[in-house]
Image (cartoon, coloured by chain):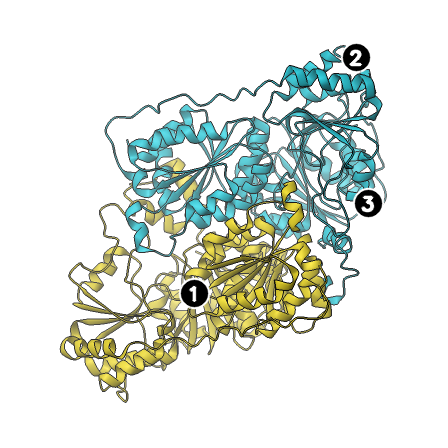
Chain colours: A yellow, B cyan
Amino acid sequence: MNGAEALVHSLLDAGVDTCFANPGTSEMHFVAALDRIAGMRCVLGLFEGVVTGAADGYYRLADRPAATLLHLGPGLANGLANLHNAKKAHSGIVNVVGEHATAHLELDAPLTSDVEGVARPMSHWVHTVESVDKVANAGRAAVSAASARPGQIASLILPADKAWSEFGDAPAAQGAVMTAAPDAVDAESVLSIAKTLRSSGKSTLLLLGGPAVREGAAQWAGRIAAATGCAVMCEFYAERISRGAGRFPLPRLPYSVDAAVQKLAAFEHIVLVGAMPPVAFFAYPNKPGRLYSPGTNLHRLAHRGNDVEGALRMLAEATDATRTAFVTPSRRQAADTEGPLTPASIGALLATLIPENAVVVDEAVSTGRGFDGVTHDAAPHEWLTTMGGSIGYALPVAVGAAIAAPERKVVALVGDGSAMYTLQALWTMAREGLDVTTVIFANRTYQILRGEFANVGAGEPGARATDMLTIDRPALDWVSLARGHGVGATRVTNLAEFAAAMRSSLASGGPSLIEVIL
Amino acid sequence: MNGAEALVHSLLDAGVDTCFANPGTSEMHFVAALDRIAGMRCVLGLFEGVVTGAADGYYRLADRPAATLLHLGPGLANGLANLHNAKKAHSGIVNVVGEHATAHLELDAPLTSDVEGVARPMSHWVHTVESVDKVANAGRAAVSAASARPGQIASLILPADKAWSEFGDAPAAQGAVMTAAPDAVDAESVLSIAKTLRSSGKSTLLLLGGPAVREGAAQWAGRIAAATGCAVMCEFYAERISRGAGRFPLPRLPYSVDAAVQKLAAFEHIVLVGAMPPVAFFAYPNKPGRLYSPGTNLHRLAHRGNDVEGALRMLAEATDATRTAFVTPSRRQAADTEGPLTPASIGALLATLIPENAVVVDEAVSTGRGFDGVTHDAAPHEWLTTMGGSIGYALPVAVGAAIAAPERKVVALVGDGSAMYTLQALWTMAREGLDVTTVIFANRTYQILRGEFANVGAGEPGARATDMLTIDRPALDWVSLARGHGVGATRVTNLAEFAAAMRSSLASGGPSLIEVIL
């Protein structure tokens, strides 16, 4: 057995059985090991940002890490932006990054770089394997790090000679993978927050984030709100919100600083449940960075790493809310299917079309800003948003979600500007026959930047600035781009065409793309 | 005047008048400054790897740095792989990287990351601007760092508040930009090498790299070889080789370890002229990393940062070779235009089709391995290869070369696997109307990895390994991919079609793509 084989065994033993890969020469022994060891599903991406984003999407649906296989420093670098997004989403990922054979490093060959240095900014855990007999344990340790709650980015750097060297019998990795049971919260602080809710329910906001917006946790928040009169919201960004008819509806904190500040000003108390103290996405001249007023009392019920659902249940018990009923939306039955394509008409139609148990991956940016409000009464579904804000996350995350949950339909809602960063994900969808409907909103502009240009006080863009904000010269042709990657596609210019294309795509069971001309 | 305007003035004053950009919110004041300050050509890319690769290509043709404009840590991260390539090519680049306003950093907003940490592995110089009054000098210092010989990657991090803050009168940046005159070499070592050449010319190799393979320098090597009987070769990789009819032909050191070792074994002395001691690209079990035998005497005539052409002229003087004639190839007149497409037939045809003064950007990888040998008698042209080995360099470098040298035709020769990493470059070619002919060699496999799989001793790939090495399921459709980006395209399946498509594309004066089915 060689080091690469030991690593594959180690990953499999620790429960990692899916690997998103874009390998190179130094990873060939890992690839060869796949032939000799059954059980590792290896999914090829044509660009590393697809690979790392897919691992993020996989974790969000599977609640356990996948591996990635990346080639040296530059291959890892290409995956960093979506590792940043995954890190901020607290998705656990085991990156296996090849490195030159150790003796080769001093020769400064062309591909030599500081791989640990590249890994560090977007990783919680970085380790270079020192000898072939330590490969198995290093693999085990990487899975442990990635499996922590909340999840972590673990980057395991494997020099080629450690992969190809042989070493007698197969060594079992020593020590168990850290189990991922989250810590319970402190009972005293639950009681203190319960007291606040009883005395000041109507001026208290439960702000939910992370695991608190999953169905099991959020229903406790619904009961508490019904019993105490408190408000409930979730952070603007969430790695996975359970939404739709029959579920407690979670309004999102607005993205706009002014709107968010206004919303939060109504509350004397904000109770953070897996959420961070709410802050602005960007800084703007003469606007606050913190969205809550200085006089607000912040309470923390639970960190992300805590047993958030358990904490909410404890709070429901302490507020006598465990059996209190809450109001949920009924499933929307109809929406206009005639007329022009507007964000509002598209959103309303989506509310009738999102299939039950679907995974919606939302990177619709400016077009989709209002989808949230109009799709709360769709069939029950999971809604995924970016957590790190680096655009180009949605198509790769859709790949990973579809691999992790083949029984669900995946709908990716993506702006044309965003989709261009990682469009190669379409090829992996075609290759793996993934049940993903990709909707590209083609406004042919970095529309969000037009708003931000004004927000940061830069005034009205002139000709040269406008040139940096528009992508209509030439117009991208998404039907051709999709077909080039092996994915069938349709272009729609009105609501009726969009409805027909969505129904057809959702019925197909495989990947397809709809270009929505706005 | 605000900080962003001061930076644009500072860059322009220091001679940087081209900026490849993919901006975001924190860069909006820089974009706004473009409206108010004339003279900065800003070229939009839809992915940051296009932006940084274009800056590399620009430097290779212009011999002076361009700027890039990148959005925070993740935007910079997306550009790192081509910054790696540019760093190894010693291309000078000034990266302007936006950062959150300083007060916003402690809030840990979604896009917060360690921007300096991201920059460091692929930069020679990293600096975060501390206050608005220091912006202009920081810009000047960044251009100085990038303009060193050899060129450097300078990453200037500009917090948004330093960009938007106002500060009275326009401050002139203080201190001159470092001029880039390279150092002369030591006369003693020139004389010592001349002595070796006179006594052991036939067993001596001049190994040229970097600036030594440009026309002005290489002709002195030709004279020295003719006078002393020494051999001349260049490194396998070179950022810009002057080649073709009427120029001294420079055979490249082979990529294959065995072939390179065999070639070099013939020499007692290797004189390094802007070149590195020759090493293998990758390490392989039971093969040497150094390509020269331990008994070889290595002499260094000049480092890359030296006046390499001057050093060769001094060596020519010391060997009485300044007027010695050398043999150059005559221009090839004809090649087969009928028959199947093979690397050899394509290469021979290219030798007749490469236009005079063209820039050939070579990322043809396995298909193009032999193009070198058969195109030495094409019309005089410049040949650019990857220097860092991270694939996805060619299309962006072609963009930058075409921007820097609009009077030249650019021909990008790219493998299908490589081209997929940065295909968004096609859109910038269309937008800017660049005179670039892109030839995609569609073998639908990571062919080089099939060879490397055997080289590293992994044996024959089985089904699962083969799946990671082939990209034919589904086949990419490059004609559709090009059209999707606004670039016209043709698919060719035999030599006659290829010849016709090349002639038509080269005559068009704008961008087009030819998919060569192998």
Q: Would you say residue A312 is visible in this rendering? A: yes
- Is label 2 in contact with label 3 (beta carbons under 8 Å)? no
Q: Chain ID for label 3?
A: B
> Label 1 amino acid?
His
- Which residue lies at the image location 86% right of the left edge and 44% below the top edge? B339
Residue at which label 2 appears:
B324
In the rendered image, residue B335, in percent from the top left (x then y), is placed at 84, 34
> Label 3 amino acid?
Thr
Q: Residue furthest bottom?
A: A323
Tags 1 and 3 both on a single chain? no
Residue at which label 1 appears:
A90
- Is label 2 in contact with label 1 (beta carbons under 8 Å)? no
In the rendered image, residue A269, in percent from the top left (x then y), is placed at 19, 69
For label 3, the SS is: loop
Q: Residues within 10 Å of mark 2 (few under 14, many from 20)?
A: some
Q: Residues within 10 Å of mark 1 (few under 14, many from 20)?
A: many
Q: Quadrant of residue B140?
A: top left
- Which residue lies at the image location 68% right of the left edge and 66% below the top edge? A5
Mark sitting on residue B278? none
Tags 2 and 3 both on a single chain? yes
> Label 2 amino acid?
Thr
Q: Chain ID for label 1?
A: A
Camera-nearest residue between B246 and A494: B246
Q: Residues within 10 Å of mark 3 (few under 14, many from 20)?
A: few
Tags 2 and 1 both on a single chain? no
- Which residue lies at the image location 42% right of the left edge and 46% below the top edge? B115
Q: CA distance from mark 1 to mark 3?
A: 49 Å
Is residue A182 left or right of A312 when viewed as pictured? right
For label 1, the SS is: loop
Q: Chain ID for label 2?
A: B
Q: Up-down: is B203 above or below A43?
A: above
Q: CA distance from mark 2 to mark 1?
A: 68 Å
